[in-house]
Amino acid sequence: MVGEVTILSEWIPEQMSPGSVFVLENAGDVGDTNDPYWAVMACPECGTLGLITRKQVAGLIPVMCGSSQCSAQFFINDNDIVVRKPS
Ligand SMILES: [Zn+2]
């Protein structure tokens, strides 16, 4: 698993390598009002793209990979990806 977040300033799908984050242009406008969608992230383990919410970007709640082939769970801690230990 990649250990660092890479923020992309432009949406270039080919550059969405594992750990890449692209902040949505309408961040905060979509999804739950308390925890709206904020960015697209490529899973640091397998590269599957998924939407992440404001609280996930802030590291308050863990990100879970959306792929059924991958069980990655992690927190975003500033620019670091911290693997969530299975409890
Ligand atoms: Zn994954």
Image (cartoon, helix red, strand yellow):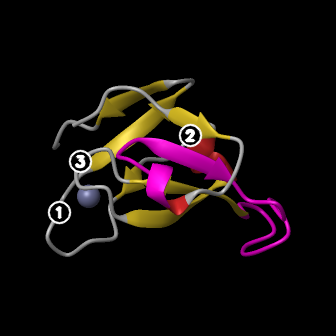
Residue 49: image quadrant is bottom left
Q: Main secondary structure of the magenta part?
A: loop
- List the residue tagged with mark 2: 60
Badge 3: few (under 14), some or many (20 or more) residues near its Cα, within 10 Å? some
The Cα–Cα distance between marks 2 and 1, rounded to whole angstroms, is 22 Å
Q: Are marks 1 and 3 in contact (CB under 8 Å)?
A: yes
Whether ligand 1 has any atom under 8 Å from the Cβ at mark 1 is answered as: yes
Where does the C terminus fall, quadrant-wise?
Answer: top left
Instruction: Please give left or right for residue 71 compared with residue 28 in the image.
Output: left
Q: Is residue 71 above or below residue 79?
A: below
At a point 73% along the width and 64% down the height, the residue shown is: 36
Give the extent of the magenta segment.
Answer: 14-36
Instruction: Give the class, few, some or many, for how many residues have Cα within 10 Å of label 2's Cα (few <14, many ≥20).
Output: few
Q: Secondary structure at mark 3?
A: loop
In-image side of 75 versus 72 (left or right): right
Residue that numbered label 1 is attached to = 70
Query: What SS does tag 1 mark?
Result: loop
Q: Which disc is residue 45 wearing?
A: 3
